[in-house]
Image (cartoon, grey):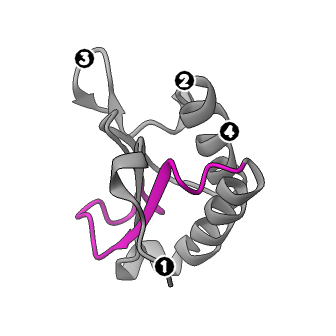
Amino acid sequence: MSTKKLHQVRHHILICEGKSCSAEGSDKVAKRIKETVKDLDREDEILITRTSCTEQCGKGPIVIVYPDGVWYREVSPKIGSRIVSEHICNGQVIENRLLVDLQENSEL
């Protein structure tokens, strides 16, 4: 594995790999996100990290996008791909998968 040039990174995607999220298929989500990042030639700009539990059990798989601070819930591989292509590449948040209301800063 090579060392990522952090000065090129524009987005950081965190994928929960806790027990609950893993049981819901977070591994497949992570694989699809990595494939999409590669297909869109954004590997230098996007850092992907698998995390331990994000303490949102029962709402997963959880995917978090920084620097935007957007938390997604119940992410399928298809939604994971959309997070990359629509949110990160085009600035369009996937509204129906938000964990937190960005306007009200409250849990949905």
Q: Closer to us: mark 4 or mark 1?
A: 1
| Callout 2 crowding tier (Cα within 10 Å): few <14, some 14–19, many ≥20 | few
Instruction: Please give the residue where the numbered disc 1 appears in the rendered image.
Output: 2
Q: Which mark is residue 76?
A: none
- Which disc, if any, is residue 85? 4
Q: Are marks 2 and 1 in contact (CB under 8 Å)?
A: no
Amino acid under disc 3: Glu
SS under mark 3: loop
If you read the primary sequence from the N terminus, does the residue marked by circle 4 or circle 3 appear first?
4
- Looking at numbered disc 1 in the image, what kind of residue is underneath it? Ser
Q: Tell which tag, 2 or 3, sits nearer the viewer.
A: 2
User: Crowdedness of circle 1 by 10 Å Cα count: few (<14), some, many (20+)?
Assistant: few
Helix, strand or loop at mark 4 = helix
Is 38 covered by the magenta stretch?
no
Magenta stretch, residue numbers: 41-64
Sooner in the amino-acid sequence: mark 2 or mark 1: 1
Residue visible at 52% across and 27% down?
93
Q: Which residue in the protein does label 3 denote? A: 104
Provide the residue designation for mark 2.
Answer: 91
Instruction: Report, in whole angstroms, how far the alpha carbon at label 1 lies from the one at label 3.
Output: 40 Å
Residue at 48% across, 79% down: 2
Query: Would you identify the image quadrant in which residue 43 lies?
Result: bottom right
